[in-house]
């Protein structure tokens, strides 16, 4: 695809993600979404820079900070963190473990699916020494780490429960 189409796709990602945040983040939970967003940015900054600097992934066409950073500002610092905020806000805390696993799987699969399409049909992202399943695993892992942090940050201090003991809680 040409550069104009790639830029319009990236711009569309910003608009769609912003609309999702406006629509699905309730006013009384903005701070909660913000904590998840910022924490996910820290994680994706670490993983994103690592894979780009090791030349596993490259981002040939980017809208922002082309000379400052090799990573994709749009996806690493806005889209993934925003989706993680929604993930944590609507996590099925009281559901059974199968429902929680399905929730993780659906969120991770959607992001990985869009990434596979972007790799195949655009120049937004290019896999150099990378496979789609590494994206799936790292996205799952960062969602899990974010979930642990979210539970720790918002745990009921009166119950003083441990949050690292069960992978699905």
Image (cartoon, helix red, strand yellow):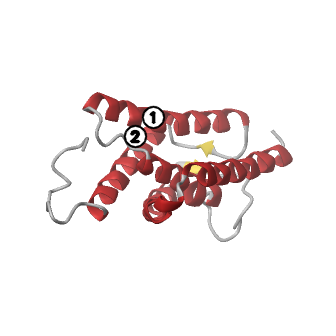
**Residue 82, labelled with which disc?**
none
- In percent of width and height, residue 128 lies at 57, 43
How far is the residue under mark 2 from the one under mark 1? 6 Å
Q: Nearer the viewer, residue 53 or 48?
A: 48
Instruction: Identify the image quadrant of residue 82.
Output: bottom right
Name the residue beneath numbered marker 2. Answer: 137
Q: Secondary structure at mark 1?
A: helix
Q: Looking at the image, do the residues carrying marks 2 and 1 touch, with CB atoms under 8 Å apart?
A: yes
Where 81 sits versus 153, above or below? above
Q: How many marks?
A: 2
Q: Residues within 10 Å of mark 2 (few under 14, many from 20)?
A: few
- In percent of width and height, residue 2 lies at 84, 43
Q: Residues within 10 Å of mark 1 (few under 14, many from 20)?
A: few
Q: Nearer the viewer, residue 15 or 66?
A: 15
- Residue at coordinates 62% horizontally, 57% vertically from top-left? 72
- In percent of width and height, residue 16 lies at 69, 47
Locate the N terminus by quadrant: top right
Name the residue beneath numbered marker 1. Answer: 133
- In percent of width and height, residue 96 lies at 26, 32
Q: Secondary structure at mark 2?
A: helix
- Residue at coordinates 39% horizontally, 42% vertically from top-left? 140
């Amino acid at each position: 695809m040409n550069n104009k189409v790639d830029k319009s796709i990236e711009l569309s990602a910003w608009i769609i993600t912003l609309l999702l945040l406006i629509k699905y983040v309730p006013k009384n939970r903005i701070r909660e979404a913000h904590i998840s967003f910022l924490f996910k940015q820290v994680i994706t900054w670490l993983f994103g820079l690592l894979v780009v600097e090791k030349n596993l992934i490259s981002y040939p066409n980017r809208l922002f900070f082309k000379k400052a950073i090799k990573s994709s500002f749009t996806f690493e610092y806005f889209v993934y963190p925003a989706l993680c905020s929604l993930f944590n806000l609507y996590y099925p805390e009281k559901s059974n473990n199968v429902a929680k696993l399905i929730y993780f799987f659906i969120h991770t699969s959607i992001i990985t699916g869009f990434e596979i399409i972007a790799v195949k049909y655009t120049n937004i992202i290019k896999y150099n020494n990378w496979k789609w399943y590494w994206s799936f695993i790292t996205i799952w892992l960062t969602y899990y780490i974010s979930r642990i942090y979210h539970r720790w940050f918002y745990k009921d201090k009166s119950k003083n429960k441990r949050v690292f003991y069960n992978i699905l809680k």
